[in-house]
Amino acid sequence: GDIVATGGFITYKFEETNGSHLPSFALEYSLTKDVANNFQSDQDADAEDLNFVRIARGNRVNSLTLTANENEEVKMTMDLNTRAVTPIPQTLASPSTGYESRGGQTANRSLFNFTAESTHLEPFFFSDGSISVYGQQFLKVTNFTLTINNNLQDKRFIGIGNKSIKDAIPAQRDYEISLTALVTDDKLFTELLNQDENNAVAESIDLVFTKDSGESFTLAFDDYFTTANTWTVPEDKGSITVEATLKPRTLTDCTTTTHWVLQG
């Protein structure tokens, strides 16, 4: 994708990659005690009593869920497929095979992505978002969920690697959007009955969330069906609500604008 930096902000535009290989990343998990050099794994012969570290390698996203519910922050959860989890050697031998967790930084303030600016740490809220479907902005959505599933399949092969390492092959990626809204018209119901895939250029599913600080993220989907509608009609009082499920095939835009911090 593209990266553009202007006026203290940086904008990322991500392109969809839906091939036979997905990018992976590593995660470090560390628990340390408040002692000198508590980030080093080779302080003594049994250093796990001071610094417990595990490295998860080859993490690929199996599924991602983004939720925006009324009166809540926007939240995201991920299910990761991990190739291997590796313990860190604990030794005082020479040359040392020790490991410095947290990049060797004892204070949070020294981490490369630390920021003291409060607006950088504020979450997106459901009230700062807009959702457009079939070319119309839905003004009364109370709950929203986006699920992206890569459907990774665990594989191990005879004579390759060992039993503690696995591979994962992506299957067909699928997207699912579910929302609950107050009923203001019958558009969703009509499109459900039509049973047509919507691929109109001006009628993509647009999700836009912003903050007063100027940060934002945008997701746009095309080629989608309305696959389910549940209409709740209360017996005596209250508003009529609809629970709808949409299934897009194509992610056409994924853009985020955020602050960028120069490290001195």
Image (tube, rainbow, N blue to C red):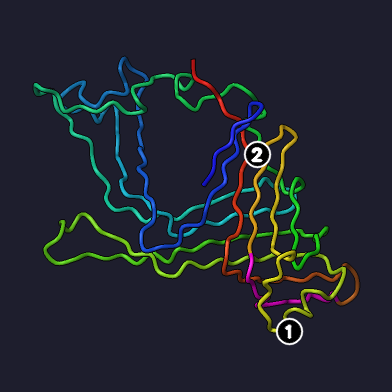
Amino acid at the residue labelled 2: Pro
Please give the name of the residue rendered at 77% of the width and 47% of the height, measured from the top-left corner: 127
Q: Residue at x 24, y 27 (%)?
A: 41
Q: Which residues are magenta?
A: 222-234
- Is label 1 in a helix, a strand or a loop? helix
Q: Secondary structure at mark 2?
A: loop
What secondary structure characterizes most of the magenta part?
strand
Total numbered badges shown on the rendered structure: 2
Disc assigned to residue 123: 2
Where does residue 5 sit, x and y in percent of width and height? 59, 32
Look at the image and say whether residue 166 sits in the magenta stretch. no
**Residue 227 magenta-drawn?**
yes
Nearer to us: label 2 or label 1? 1
Q: Which residue is denoted by mark 1 in the rendering?
A: 194
Work out how far the residue at label 2 is from the one at label 1, CA to CA, in angstroms.
Answer: 38 Å
Q: Is residue 114 left or right of residue 205?
A: left
Of residue 220 and residue 36, the one placed in the foreground of this image is 220
> Is 154 rendered above or below residue 130?
below
- Residue 141 falls in image quadrant: bottom right
